[in-house]
Image: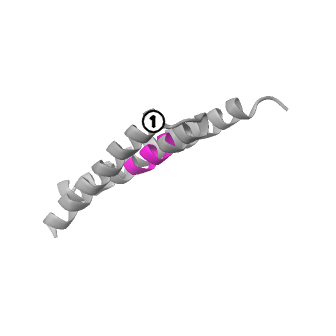
């Protein structure tokens, strides 16, 4: 089971690296923001998988929730900024 979590961790890291490349190659602002939001979601999952590997899930859930809330607030602020004033 431990090897499964290591493989999952490696897969999530690969997705984050692909999204970083996509963020720099993206042609429009929306492509770049979408890649950034996918990175946010994957980092939350990475934190949870590290918690499963460490057997300290309680601490890592708190950290992941805090990071997810910050990511959500950032999403709302950037959407308002990009959308303009109406």
Residue in view at x 55 percent, y 35 percent: 27
Q: Is residue 33 left or right of residue 59?
A: right
Q: Position of residue 84 (x, y in %)?
A: 76, 30
Left or right, 70 with respect to 12, comes to right
The magenta-colored residue range is 36-42
Q: Residue drawn 59% across and 35% down?
A: 28
Q: Residue furthest left?
A: 3
Closest to the observer, 7 or 68:
7
* Residue 38, horizontal then vertical, whole percent: 47, 48
Task: Name the image quarter holding residue 56.
Answer: bottom left
Say which of 25 and 5 sits in front.
Answer: 25
Residue at the spot 45% in from the left edge and 49% down from the top edge: 41
Q: Residues within 10 Å of mark 1 (few under 14, many from 20)?
A: few
Q: Main secondary structure of the magenta part?
A: helix
- The quarter of the picture where the N terminus appears is bottom left
* Residue 67 relative to residue 57: left or right: right
Q: Please name the residue that numbered disc 1 is placed on.
A: 25
Q: Horizontal and vertical percent for residue 43?
A: 37, 46
């Amino acid at each position: 089971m431990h090897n499964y979590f290591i493989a999952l961790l490696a897969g999530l890291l690969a997705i984050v690296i692909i999204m970083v490349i996509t963020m720099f190659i993206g042609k429009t602002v929306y492509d770049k923001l979408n890649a950034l939001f996918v990175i946010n979601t994957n980092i939350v999952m990475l934190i949870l998988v590290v918690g499963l590997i460490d057997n300290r899930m309680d601490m890592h859930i708190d950290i992941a929730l805090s990071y997810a809330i910050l990511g959500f607030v950032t999403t709302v602020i950037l959407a308002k900024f990009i959308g303009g004033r109406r």
